[in-house]
Image: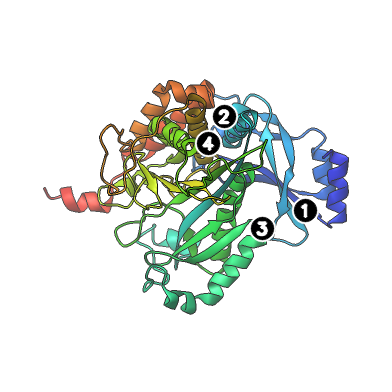
Amino acid sequence: MKMDDLGRRLEKENINVIHAGQFDYGSVFRERRLNREQFLAWARDPRFANVLAFWDCSDSLFGSGPYLSEPVGIDEGSLRPYAFEPNAAAIITDFTGPSAPLMPRTVLKAQIDRAAAMGFDVTAAFEFEVVMLTESAASLRANDFAPPGQFAPDNKCWSGQTAADHAGFVAELEAGIKAHGVSLFSLAGELGPGCFEATLGAVPALRAADDACFFRTATRSIARSKGLTASFMPYLGAAYPAIGGHVHLSLTSKASGKNVFSDPGRTTNETAKHFIAGMTKVVPQAFALCAHTVNAYRRFAPGSWAPKCVSWDEWTFTTAVRSVPSDNDSARLEFRLPGADCNPHLSLALLLGAGLDGLEQKLSAPERAPAGGPDDIPPGAIRLPRDLAEAAGRLRESADAKTLFGAAFVEHFAKVCDIEHTSLIRAVSNVELKRYLEG
């Protein structure tokens, strides 16, 4: 679509305001709000500040610059409703200059292009747990982020009572999410106080990651409009469940139009096993791509539901890879390691890039782990990193990661993770004070 065509579409659809931006490492949509005429004028030579690749989640810059505006490309196909205001839309831009290789969406697009060159279309969907809290932005800060108030404290997993008690809230949340062009398959209560789970619909891979980011933005905003806070923090503490951001993926042959993971015997076929084998090899090295915060590793504490290595089985919920075999297009693999705060573009890039390596090299998958619990490490399996510092070190040293995602990105993102780890290493919690202060 050329810019003239986009202009005509905006006029035809009565879109008067455009939010143009891109997602940073924390999947925050960093944007410019422009009226239609201003947007079309800006689009003649679109640029965006390259600080997106050089700041952390607190907007603190690192590195030596230079910090300046770099050219961006406008992804016309990403245009979607922006339901926070009338007659508005959002559109995604991507750096095309020096910062391009450092950005999550570019990293994912490279793996999608690689899949296409191998003859595959990629379909994906994310599944997020979220915890609702009875706190506003002001109350959280007034209480210095003390343990927050619980929404639906009596909730039980998949409770019909919770569904009945909070039906109005859930229906409004569902409508708000869909109003942003997000494909939503289901929304229901999950395990623990205030916990809900949203399963997004299966769509082409790039759209799936974009949907995941806009889903979280919409959910947070809708919660705030109700005086609540929607938290995607993987582990809020002992009173709450650890929450995930699982990724589902399937591959379709461009030649035949068939799902290459499907099998007449409804079992995990050799193609899927090669894909799993690639994950087994690469994910422990590049785990930081799907767990880039300090808190993400709290979810992997002993005794949690989160697996501690890249094991797999059919249908089971205690392995890192859950194979969903079928004789039709529903055959897929579910990557259960990312937390709810994961970067969707990087998590999907990790899953896809690792799996494609397994296909190209025809790697052999390890044995299934049907009886293994989340804390079990099967013989020969590599334990996942225990914290963000270890994950950053493994990523920096990984030749496979550099080949897959580019040496420049790997070195830069490892530095991002180092900085995030260092930002909290000197922090002392109330729990530590209680344990050690009088010792």
What amino acid type is highlighted by mark number 2?
A: Leu
Q: Earlier in the sequence, mark 4 or mark 1?
A: 1
Query: Are the two marked residues, 2 and 1, in contact with CB atoms closer than 8 angstroms?
Result: no
What amino acid type is highlighted by mark number 1?
A: Val
Report helix, strand or loop for mark 4.
helix
Q: Residue at x 58, y 35 (%)?
A: 108
Quote the CA–CA distance across marks 4 and 3.
26 Å
Residue closer to the observer: 227 or 381: 381
| Residue that badge 4 annotates | 352
Expressed as whole percent of the image width and height from the top left, the position of residue 72 reads 71, 33
Report helix, strand or loop for mark 2.
helix
Quote the CA–CA distance across marks 4 and 1.
35 Å
What amino acid type is highlighted by mark number 3?
A: His
- The answer to whether any part of residue 411 appears in the image is no
Q: Nearer the viewer, mark 1 or mark 3?
A: 3
> Residue 113: which quarter of the image?
top right
Q: Earlier in the sequence, mark 4 or mark 2?
A: 2
What amino acid type is highlighted by mark number 4?
A: Leu
Q: Earlier in the sequence, mark 4 or mark 3?
A: 3
Q: Earlier in the sequence, mark 2 or mark 3?
A: 2
> Residue 238: which quarter of the image?
bottom left
Q: Nearer the viewer, mark 4 or mark 1?
A: 4
Judge the density around disc 3: few (<14), some (14-19), many (≥20) Cα neighbours within 10 Å. Answer: many
| Residue that badge 1 annotates | 17
Report helix, strand or loop for mark 3.
loop
Q: Earlier in the sequence, mark 1 or mark 3?
A: 1
Quote the CA–CA distance across marks 2 and 1.
29 Å
| Residue that badge 3 annotates | 180
In the displayed structure, 282 sits above or below 233; it is above
Quote the CA–CA distance across marks 1 and 3.
14 Å
